[in-house]
Amino acid sequence: MRRSFSWREKLGRLVHFRLMIPLMRSPHPPEYTARGVMVGVFWAFTPLIGVQMYLVFLTWLLARRRPRFEFGLIVSLAWTWVTNVATMIPIYYAFYVTGLAMLGRLDAIPPFNHFLQVWQVTLEVEGFFQRIMVYVRIMAAEQGVPMIIGSIPYAVGFAWLSYRWSLKFMRHRHRVRAERRAKHSRPRSSSDANSRAKAPDHTASEGGGLR
């Protein structure tokens, strides 16, 4: 019988398998991995759900020309899942409200239910390209500019925070690994030294025999 998980357990498992495992399995230096997290989170917090992975890939191709800006593609793709179809509408609403506030149009902020009705159309459309067309129509018609402007503080802010956190996390993880390797190598090296010390000096004994 399969075990049923609560929504908290499901969320924890999702975070663990989608985000943390790709991060922990990265064999690259902490800075390289942290840049991957940063790029993934940056694109995650833009109103471009559905094409974020393609944008990460294009960013990766551009970054490869500059070794200082290279990052882990797999980790970056994984961290675009910070936002997804399930969280799209609340996050888009936050972008839209923030953008209207930044433009000084507080009186134009719609209630959430109205915003929800507009965007539920995209979730009901079948087919990737058909959904993209509906998305473009909604963005171009009324909400595009405020939403894009409103997403900038979230994209930049969360990208910077994710870089700092993941860099600290990976440095700690690399340090723990190094300490474990050093700990396991000490008994072996000391036992080798003891065995060499206890071994009889055959050269000396043979030299004595020659005399």
Image (spheres, grey):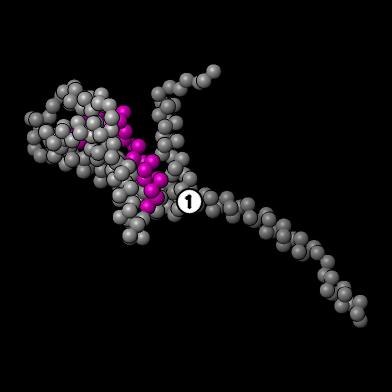
Find numbered disc 1 in the image and state the secondary structure of the residue it sits on.
Answer: loop
Quadrant in which residue 153 is drawn? top left
Kindly identify the residue that appears in the image at 63 percent across and 55 percent down.
185
Quadrant (top left/top right/bottom left/bottom right) for the N terminus: top right
In the image, residue 87 lies in the stretch drawn in magenta: yes
Kindly identify the residue that appears in the image at 44 percent across and 54 percent down.
29
Kindly identify the residue that appears in the image at 8 percent across and 37 percent down.
104
* Residue 177 or residue 197, whichever sits in front: 177
* Residue 76 or residue 127, whichever sits in front: 127
Overall secondary structure of the magenta section: helix
Residue 103 horizontal/vertical position (percent):
10, 39
Residue 97 horizontal/vertical position (percent):
16, 33
Vertical placement of residue 30 versus 114, above or below: below
| Extreme residue in the bottom direction | 211
Task: Identify residue for label 1.
Answer: 27
Residue 158 appears in the rendering: no
**Is the residue marked by circle 1 packed among few (<14), some (14-19), or many (20+) residues within 10 Å?**
few
Quadrant in which residue 14 is drawn? top left
Residue 159 horizontal/vertical position (percent):
30, 45
Quadrant in which residue 99 is drawn? top left
Residue 210 appears in the rendering: yes
The residue type indicated by label 1 comes to: Pro
* Residue 101 or residue 122, whichever sits in front: 122
Residue 65 horizontal/vertical position (percent):
33, 60
Q: Which residues are magenta?
A: 71-99
In the image, residue 104 lies in the stretch drawn in magenta: no
| Residue 43 relative to residue 190: left or right | left
| Residue 1 relative to residue 73: left or right | right
Vertical placement of residue 58 versus 122, above or below: below
Quadrant (top left/top right/bottom left/bottom right) for the C terminus: bottom right
